[in-house]
Image (spheres, grey):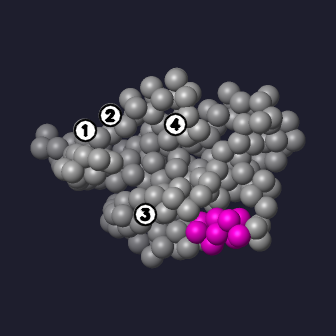
Amino acid sequence: MVTLILILVTAAVSILCFTGKLDINALKFNAYDVWHRKQWYRMLSYGLVHGGWGHLFFNMLTLYFFGTVVERYFQAAFGNTPGIILYVVLYVSAIAVSTVGDLVKYRDAYGYNAVGASGAVSAVLFASILFEPKMGIYIYLIPIPVPGYLFAPLYLLYCWYMAKRNMDNIGHTAHFWGAVYGLLFPLICRPDIFHHFLSRLGF
C-alpha cells in the first residue's frame, strides 16, 4: 500500500513536470545550488521528478515489484506500523544519501543536475536482496533470472566502473551508494537480519 502511494506521488509530480505545470528546474538536484545557495530541499525533491516517460516507468515498475517485498519484510521484522515507518524512512533518506557523493564532487559545477528516484529504488532493490538473496532478478537482454546474491556484486561493480568512466548521463554514483545504503539501513536497524540473510543462503 505504501509502495503504491510512493509511486503515485512520484508519478504525479513527474507528470506535472512533463506537462509544464511544474517547473522541473526548481526541483532537480543541482549540487551548486545545494552547496552554495543552501537549497537543501533539492536533496529530496529531485527524487520526485524524472527525465522522461521511460525513466519514470522503469523506476516505478522496479519500485512496485521490489518495494512490495521490502514493505512486507519490514512489517514482519519490525511490526506493522514501525515497519511501514522504517520503510518510508529508508526510501526517503536514500534519495538524499545516494546523492551525497555527487554533492561533494560537483559542488562547484553549476551545470551538473540530476533527477530521478533511481538511488532510492536501488536501495529498495538491495534491501530486498538482503531479505531474499536467492530471489531471481531479470537483467536487460538476459532471458533467465540472476540470483540476488550474484546480481548485487555485479551491479555494484558495474556502477563503480561506469561512475569512474563518466561516459554517459546516468547517475551511477547515486545508484552505487543507494544500493549500499539499502543493505546497511536494515542491518543498522536490526543487526540480526544478517543471520536471516545467511540462513537464506543455506549457512
Q: Which of 12 and 187 is in front in this view?
A: 12
Kindly report the distance in space between the C-alpha atoms of the residues bearing marks 1 and 2: 7 Å
Q: Which of 182 and 31 is in front in this view?
A: 31
Q: Mark 4 touching mark 1, by CB under 8 A?
A: no
Q: Mark 1 touching mark 2, by CB under 8 A?
A: yes
> Which residue type carries mark 3?
Leu
What residue sits 68% from the left and 65% below the top?
A: 18
Kindly report the distance in space between the C-alpha atoms of the residues bearing marks 4 and 1: 19 Å
Q: In this view, does 171 lie above or below 7?
A: above
> Mark 4 — residue?
172
> Mark 3 — residue?
61
**Furthest-top residue in this view:** 164
Question: In the figure, is residue 51 to the left or right of 61?
Answer: right
Instruction: Name the secondary structure under disc 1.
Output: helix
* Residue 195 visible (yes or no): no
> Mark 2 — residue?
154
> Which residue type carries mark 2?
Leu
> Which residue type carries mark 1?
Leu
Crowding around mark 1 (Cα neighbors within 10 Å: few <14, some 14 to 19, many 20+) is some
Q: Is residue 3 above or below residue 189?
A: below
Residue 108 picture quarter: top right
Mark 4 or mark 3, which has the lower sequence index? 3
**At which x and y percent is residue 52?**
59, 58
What numbered label is drawn on residue 150?
1
Label the magenta part by its dominant secondary structure: helix
Mark 4 or mark 1, which has the lower sequence index? 1
In the image, the segment drawn in magenta is 10-19
Instruction: Name the secondary structure under disc 4.
Output: helix
What residue sits 25% from the left and 46% below the top?
A: 142
